């Protein structure tokens, strides 16, 4: 049992250490430098690229807004069912939590009783070695508190969840613009820029 417990602790330690290291690592973002073409005809070529970019961004925003409206409508339809699921999950959590409180109370009582018996013995015996040692309460015997209490769904949170799953905000308009810019003789130079945890 102790070997198994050590293996579990080692696994969690490695996982925690890996997470900390990854969260501290520098994070980079690609930014683009646009170098305009030098001749006049190529500069004229860029005007349709800019018009297409504006049209793409406008269409993308319209599609996202329309999708957001549908997400809100779908959320209104799904909310009663999600509330029922929440009530079931809450009842299960409450039952587990009540069991946890009872188990914790018994665990604490056993621990306190053992300590009290040793203290009583020490106060009456002249030889401390005659008193039994307080039994070690194994960590594995400690009751485990149930996971976080479920949160009730709201119309706003459900709408946001559906929107994130179904609505696309990035229509790759910038990628299309850079491609058009390059085809007109302009230069597109990528740069890796550190945006977080930079030294």
Image (spheres, rainbow, N blue to C red):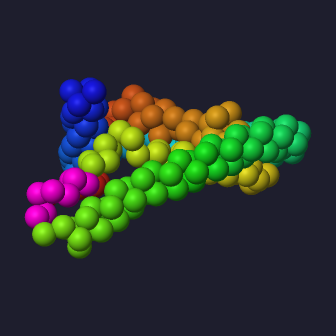
> In percent of the image, x 30 and y 68: which residue is there?
120
Where residue 118 sits in the image (x, y, percent)?
Answer: 27, 62
> In percent of the image, x 74 and y 44: which residue is there?
91
Name the image quarter holding the N terminus. top left
131 drawn magenta? yes
Where residue 119 sits in the image (x, y, percent)?
Answer: 27, 68
In this view, the residue in front, 115 or 142, is 115
Total number of numbered labels?
0
Examine the rendered structure and indicate whether residue 45 appears above or below residue 54: above
Examine the rendered structure and indicate whether residue 129 appears above or below residue 141: below
Residue 112 visible in rendering: yes
**Magenta stretch: dominant secondary structure:** loop
Examine the rendered structure and indicate whether residue 196 appears above or below residue 48: below
102 drawn magenta? no
In this view, the residue in front, 19 or 30, is 19
> In percent of the image, x 41 and y 36: which residue is there?
178
In this view, the residue in front, 70 or 97, is 97
In this view, the residue in front, 134 or 72, is 134
Where residue 163 sits in the image (x, y, percent)?
Answer: 69, 41
List the single residue furthest toward the bottom. Answer: 123
Q: Is residue 158 left or right of residue 194?
A: right
Q: Is residue 65 left or right of residue 103?
A: right
> In percent of the image, x 64 and y 50: which residue is there?
98
Where residue 21 sits in the image (x, y, percent)?
Answer: 20, 45
Q: Is residue 125 left or right of residue 144?
A: left
Residue 60 visible in rendering: no
Which quadrant holds residue 37? top left
Q: Which residues are magenta?
A: 127-134
Name the image quarter holding the C terminus. bottom left
């Amino acid at each position: 049992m102790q070997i198994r417990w050590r293996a579990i602790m080692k696994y969690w330690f490695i996982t925690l250490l890996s997470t900390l290291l990854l969260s501290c690592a520098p994070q980079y973002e690609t930014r683009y430098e646009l170098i305009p073409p030098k001749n006049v005809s190529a500069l004229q070529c860029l005007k349709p690229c800019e018009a297409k970019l504006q049209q793409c961004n406008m269409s993308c925003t319209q599609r996202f807004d329309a999708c957001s409206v549908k997400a809100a409508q779908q959320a209104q339809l799904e909310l009663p069912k999600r509330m029922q699921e929440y009530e079931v999950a809450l009842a299960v959590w409450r039952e587990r939590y009540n069991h946890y409180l009872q188990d914790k109370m018994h665990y604490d009582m056993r621990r306190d009783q053992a300590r009290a018996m040793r203290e009583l013995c020490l106060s009456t015996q002249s030889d401390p070695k005659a008193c039994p040692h307080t039994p070690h309460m194994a960590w594995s015997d400690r009751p485990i508190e149930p996971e976080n209490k479920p949160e009730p769904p709201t119309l706003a949170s459900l709408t946001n969840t559906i929107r994130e799953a179904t609505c696309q905000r990035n229509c790759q308009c910038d990628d299309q613009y850079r491609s058009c810019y390059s085809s007109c003789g302009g230069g597109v130079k990528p740069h890796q820029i550190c945006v977080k945890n930079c030294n």
